[in-house]
Image (cartoon, grey):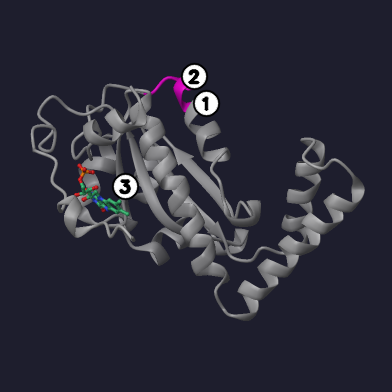
Amino acid sequence: MDVFELSSKRFTTKHYDPSRKISPDDMGKLKEILRLTPSSVNSQPWHFIIGSSDKAKKLIRPAIMDFNWPRTDDCSHFVVLCIKEDLDESHLNAVTAQENADGRFPNEQIKEEGDSKRKWYVSMKRERGQLRSWATHQVYIAMASLLYGAASLGIQSTAIEGYNPSKLDAILSLREKGLRSVAIVTLGYGALDDSNASRKKSRLPAETLFTELD
Ligand SMILES: Cc1cc2nc3c(=O)[nH]c(=O)nc-3n(C[C@H](O)[C@H](O)[C@H](O)COP(=O)(O)O)c2cc1C
C-alpha cells in the first residue's frame, strides 16, 4: 500500500483484540521507524518507552483517562513518547559522534561546522525558553511516523493524549531520567467489534485547507 492509500485507509482503533500480539519482527521494524524519524538539526530529542506485559499495562493505568482504558488494557504494545528535558552537551556530542561514525562528514571541517551550528541552534532555543516545545514538535513527527509505519505493516494504532502526563511521568520516574512524556501510542489488532472500524473517515474539505498562491 502506498502512502496515499495508507492515509485514506488508516483509522484510529478504539477496541483491540487482546489475544493478538505484534510479532518481535514487526516491533523491530516499528522501533527502527521511530529511530529513523527526522528531526530539526538532527537533534533527536526523544526517548521511547515500550510496554506489552500485563504488569506494564497495569503500571501505567492510573495515569490513563478511563475512556482510554480499552486501548491501553487490550493493545498488544504501547509506546510512551518522551522528550529529553534538556539537550545537553553530552547528547549533542553523541549525535555528532554518531553522524561521524555513520560517515556523514566528508572531512573534519564540515564535522566541526555541523557540530557548532547545531549547538548554536539548540542554545538559541534554550535562551528563548523554547527547548521543550521545540522537542515536543519533533516527537509528534515520530508519532506520525509510528502511526503510518504501523498501518503499513497492517498494525492498528491509537494516538493518545487522554492521560495525565505528570502522573505518568511520576509512575515511570521520568524526571529522574531527564525525560517528560508527550503522548502515548497503543498498537495491536482491532477487535472484530471495534466501534471505530465501520465509521466513515471525516475531514474538513480541501478548499478550506489550502491556499494556492499565484
Ligand atoms: C495527537 C492525538 C491525540 C489523540 N488522543 C486520543 C485519545 O486520547 N483517545 C482516543 O481514543 N483517540 C485519540 N486520538 C484519535 C483521534 O480522535 C482521531 O485520530 C481522529 O478522530 C481522526 O480519526 P481517524 O484517526 O480514525 O482518522 C488522538 C489523535 C491524535 C492525532
Pinpoint residue 17: horizontal percent, then vertical percent: 22, 27
What residue is drawn where x is 48% and y is 53%? Answer: 139
Q: Amino acid at mark 2?
A: Asp
Q: Quadrant of residue 77?
A: top left
> For mark 1, does the 10 Å Cα neighbourhood hold few (<14), some (14 to 19), or many (20 or more) residues?
few
Q: Quadrant of residue 117?
A: bottom right
Q: Is the C-beta of the residue carrying label 1 under 8 Å from the nearest atom of ligand 1?
A: no
Residues at marks 3 and 1 touching, judged by CB atoms closer than 8 Å: no
CA gap between label 2 and label 3 equals 22 Å
What residue is drawn where x is 23% and y is 34%? Answer: 8
Pinpoint residue 84: horizontal percent, then vertical percent: 59, 59
Q: Closest to the observer: 153 or 172?
A: 153
Q: What's drawn in magenta, residue-wise? A: 22-27
24 relative to 125, above or below: above
Q: From the image, tell me which residue sits under label 2.
A: 25
Principal secondary structure, stretch drawn in magenta: helix
Pinpoint residue 212: horizontal percent, then vertical percent: 30, 57
**Which is more N-terminal, label 1 or label 3?**
1
Q: From the image, tell me which residue sits under label 3.
A: 159
Q: Closest to the observer: 172 or 198?
A: 198
The label number, if any, that marks residue 61 in the structure image: none
Quarter occupied by the N terminus = top left
Residues at marks 2 and 3 touching, judged by CB atoms closer than 8 Å: no
104 relative to 181, above or below: above
- Is 121 on the left or on the right of 63, as rendered? right
**Which is more N-terminal, label 3 or label 2?**
2
Q: Residue furthest right?
A: 108
Q: From the image, tell me which residue sits under label 1.
A: 28
Q: Secondary structure at mark 1?
A: helix
- Is 63 on the left or on the right of 40, as rendered? left
Q: Is the C-beta of the residue carrying label 3 under 8 Å from the nearest atom of ligand 1?
A: yes
